[in-house]
Amino acid sequence: MMNHDDVNLPWVVAEVTAAFYRYEDALVSNNIAVLDELFWHDKNTVRLGAGENLYGIDEIRAFRAARPSAGLQRTLRHTVITTFGADYAVCSTEFTREGTEKIGRQQQTWVRFAYGWRIVAAQVSLMA
């Protein structure tokens, strides 16, 4: 059972924040190796996007490999990182891309494994 004292432990928040922004940097620079590293390499990993539903690391990898590398820059806002204990976190953010007023939303579930923090589920949506 989770204790309120275990929510947002400063050292865990710092680790997840670093992992989240490492992911964000890799995303906007289209660094596929880092993006692949930061997702859990398992058939149960899920990424639900604005136009795609990807189940398992193989589908996520194929999507990343086929994605255009232009126009990926974005501005984040309302980013909230919440950790639960030492091994579980949820990262939520909104984003906008240059040249459009559409707001995107992104949420990721992160889990600490022996080899580091990994995204086990991600969801991205665009608001009209």
Image (spheres, helix red, strand yellow):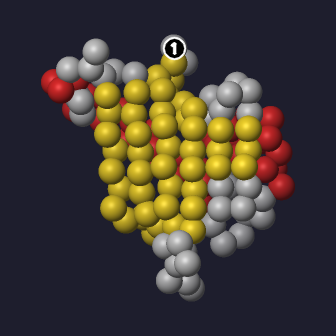
Camera sees residue 37: no
In which quarter of the view is residue 71 placed? Answer: bottom right
Residue 35 drawn at (x, y percent): 64, 43
**Secondary structure state at the residue bearing disc 1:** loop
Q: Closest to the observer: 61 or 88? A: 88
In the image: residue 54, left or right of residue 125: right
Disc 1 target residue: 114
Q: Within 10 angstroms of label 1, few (less than 14), some, or many (20 or more) residues?
A: few
Residue 49 drawn at (x, y percent): 65, 55
Image quarter hosting the N terminus? top left
Which residue is depicted at the point 51% across and 14% down? 114
Q: Is residue 91 above or below residue 41?
A: below
Which residue is depicted at the point 72% across and 61% down? 51
In the image: residue 37, left or right of residue 55: left
Q: Give the amino acid type for the residue marked by disc 1 in the picture.
A: Ala
Q: Is residue 101 above or below residue 1?
A: below
Which residue is depicted at the point 80% across and 35% down? 58
Image quarter hosting the C terminus? bottom right
Residue 74 drawn at (x, y percent): 52, 68
Q: Closest to the observer: 121 or 62? A: 121
Q: Closest to the observer: 99 or 127? A: 127
In which quarter of the view is residue 36 placed? Answer: top right
Residue 21 drawn at (x, y percent): 45, 48
In the image: residue 93, left or right of residue 24: left
In which quarter of the view is residue 12 placed? Answer: top left
In the image: residue 99, left or right of residue 64: left
